[in-house]
Amino acid sequence: MGLSYAEENYLKAILKLSGSPDGTVSTNAIAAQLDTSAASVTDMLKKLSDKELITYQRYKGASLTDDGQRIATTLVRKHRLWEVFLVQSLGMTWDEVHEIAEELEHIQSDRLIDRLDHFLGHPKFDPHGDPIPNAQGKYTLRAQIPLSELKPGQEGIVIGVREDETSFLKHLNEKGLTLGKSIKVITNDDYDNTLSLQVEGHELNLSGKVARNIMIKTT
């Protein structure tokens, strides 16, 4: 089934936003995610419904069908594998790769992606710590909590981020908070959740907003 880039982007957005028990995503949520109008979203949802890639009910929202879920998951797989390639093989930094991978994910070649996966050694996580689905659409999950939830004295390792915006990742680069860094919480302010941390020999302060978007494996 040939789909436009826009149609694929809608499917991926619905997959990302489908956190409710029935996986239904509102029109307004999709519009905000894709920075477009609700009217444009409604038009696209009707098209995707006609192609049986989503189930759409006016005023309720949309959810992926099995075919839609498969296509969206494949897009996520391709995107995250390309991010690994750009960092691991081309030496790009984690704040440079998202937009490029957004373009590369639309390449229609299962053979290429399987070869890429093999070339990279079948990675389980991308440069931002997000799980990469395998060819069967299965994810490898691991225990992780936001840095903001750690108490004074607790230690952990940075294993992921919730945001992949360039400005946020550059901010973490400046703080020295990249994947794999060991941290220890010195203080955690009850009022605004500002944290004082020890990061591999040096101390730094971190806002609660930033701490909520850093994922930690406790040690």
Image: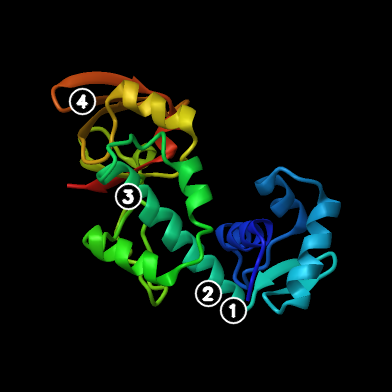
Q: Position of residue 124 (x, y in %)?
A: 29, 61
Q: Which residue bears the numbered disc 2?
A: 70
Q: Position of residue 189 (x, y in %)?
A: 38, 26
Task: Confirm whether residue 194 shows in the render.
Answer: no
Q: Earlier in the sequence, mark 3 or mark 2?
A: 2
How far apart marks 1 and 3 lie (CA) works out to 26 Å
> Which residue appears at 41% of the width and 34% of the height?
96
Q: Amino acid at mark 1?
A: Asp
Give the number of the mark in front: 4 or 2: 2
Q: Amino acid at mark 2?
A: Arg
Q: Are marks 1 and 2 in contact (CB under 8 Å)?
A: yes
Label 2 sits on a secondary structure element that is helix
Q: Which residue bears the numbered disc 3?
A: 84
How far apart marks 4 and 1 lie (CA) works out to 47 Å
How far apart marks 4 and 2 lie (CA) works out to 42 Å
Question: 182 left or right of 168?
Answer: left
Q: Earlier in the sequence, mark 1 or mark 3?
A: 1
Q: Amino acid at mark 3?
A: Val
Q: Position of residue 33 (x, y in %)?
A: 65, 47
How far apart marks 4 and 3 lie (CA) works out to 28 Å
Q: Amino acid at mark 4?
A: Gln
Question: 60 left or right of 126?
Answer: right
* Nearer to the camera, 209 or 44: 44
> Any mark on residue 67, and which?
1
Q: Residues within 10 Å of mark 1 (few under 14, many from 20)?
A: few
Q: Which residue bears the numbered disc 4?
A: 198
Q: Residues within 10 Å of mark 3 (few under 14, many from 20)?
A: many
Q: Earlier in the sequence, mark 4 or mark 1?
A: 1
Question: 176 left or right of 69?
Answer: left
* Nearer to the camera, 115 or 39: 115
> Which residue appears at 21% of the width and 34% of the height?
183
